[in-house]
Amino acid sequence: MTEGTTTTETKNPIPVTEQYNLKTDDDDIPKSEQAGTGRQGRVYSTAYSQKPGGLQVEDMIFGLKMAHLSCTDDTEGRLASPGPNTLAAVEHIVGKEDAKKPLSELLKKHFNFNMDCWIDESGWRHARAVDTQGYIASNEDTIVLSYRFTTSNMDWMTNLSMTTSEWEPDRDELIGHAGWCSCVDGLYTKYFTERGKPRIHTGFYNNFVYTIPMIRKYVLEPLLKSDATPKKVYVVGCSLGAAIATCAFCFILQEMQPSLEKPDFCNHKLINVTAGSPRVCSKQMRDQVMERMAKLRPLDRAVICRMVYNHDVVPHMPPNAIGFVHLDKLVYIPIDGHDILINPHMKETKSMAEVKTIVSNFRAANNASHPVPDSEDHHPDDDIKTRFEEECEKTPEPIKDHMPYWYLTCLERLKQRADAGDV
């Protein structure tokens, strides 16, 4: 079973704890009997979410909303020809009447944020294709750094890259990119010694590097001020934006860890929320990041929420077989969205089996049905379908499952259950 691959149909009556071999707090399976059974992960619960370093559904929903709003901006041409799924998600977040208003207005009206900085680095930089958009917004107790998902051919050039570069943001910030021939720099130590430096996807990394000056000015400087007040810092993105946000979170974590691990330092909290993120880094890079997280998570000062919905194909890219890995635990959302699973056992393979799984998911496309989105334009009895409904019918399931709309609505149903005391 790989990420985004279920073992049973959603109508299967088997309890979710058994279906995914999860750990359980129920008396049905005593802890002594769970030892050695390979049980891993759990169903989301409000009780666990309140523990230090716990994943909270409120943070997931807020982070996903902030991530999706990066699709718009303050230009006159904003959302000129959005995909139906993109527009449906924006309308779901801010309402149909406000969907095409300027981003800064949406942030202020709906979330009480001031937009501090619009990120727009596009074109060719040092003979490299770059196309990075996003924003930084804040209020008295929160900072948001959000990166836009794939919207252009330049973005696809980044997505399709399979090379890695050494993680050296301080050096690369000075030259403005990962360095000439960075994909071969350090390969000897990587493959022939045990001293290989952490490595990261070159395309995602280059797009992130151009935003470091903005991160220093609008994120790090406010956090490190002597008179700073406690803040939540959300670093968020979907798809390509999720990959760049992961790079940015690793950088902010690296810069902030020496201060945050001091109990008497200002009680900031770093929160990385991503949906449908590609793999970003090497195992050495992941190990380094997780060592930092291990110091801050018990203090409730850092958390990573990496979400995958059903058969979303993007988290399978680039292939694990060529050395790319994900950060931290998986937050898996099954297609019915009834339960959110934290760190279930989803086998990653270093063979062609993962590619075969992806192909089989495409072949089985449209066998599963998604809930029909709420829309003022459509009633269940109508014969006329919305553009979003038509797009969903035509799109293969592994791509359809990558749409942020499904992530968001499933999380909102979980929040309703949590508010009712059911989880």
Image (cartoon, rainbow, N blue to C red):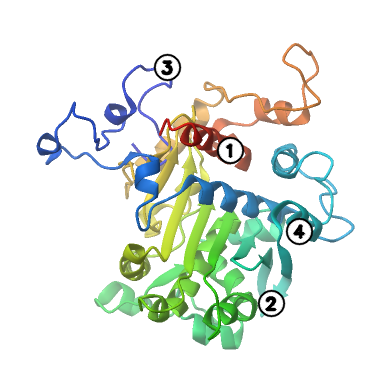
**Circle number at residue 420:** none
Give the image quarter of residue 124.
bottom right
Which secondary structure, mark 4?
helix
What crowding class fits label 3: few (fewer than 14 Cα within 10 Å), some (14-19), or many (20 or more)?
A: few
Query: What amino acid type should be assigned to the residue bearing mark 2?
Result: Arg
- Residues tagged 4 and 3 counted as in contact (Cβ below 8 A): no
Give the image quarter of residue 27.
top left
Residue that label 1 marks? 399
Which secondary structure, mark 3?
loop
Q: CA distance from mark 1 to mark 2?
A: 31 Å
Q: CA distance from mark 4 to mark 3?
A: 43 Å
Left or right: 247, with 98 as reference point: left
Q: CA distance from mark 3 to mark 2?
A: 51 Å
Query: What amino acid type should be assigned to the residue bearing mark 3?
Result: Lys
What crowding class fits label 1: few (fewer than 14 Cα within 10 Å), some (14-19), or many (20 or more)?
A: some
**Circle number at residue 108:** 4
Question: Closer to the camera, 288 or 116?
Answer: 116
Question: Closer to the camera, 364 or 280?
Answer: 280
Indicate the position of residue 149 as horizontal and vertical percent values: 64, 54
Q: Nearer the viewer, mark 1 or mark 2?
A: 1
**Circle number at residue 125:** 2
Q: Nearer the viewer, mark 3 or mark 2?
A: 3
State the residue at coordinates (54%, 77%). Answer: 223
Q: Earlier in the sequence, mark 1 or mark 3?
A: 3
Residue that label 3 marks? 11
State the residue at coordinates (50%, 53%). Answer: 278
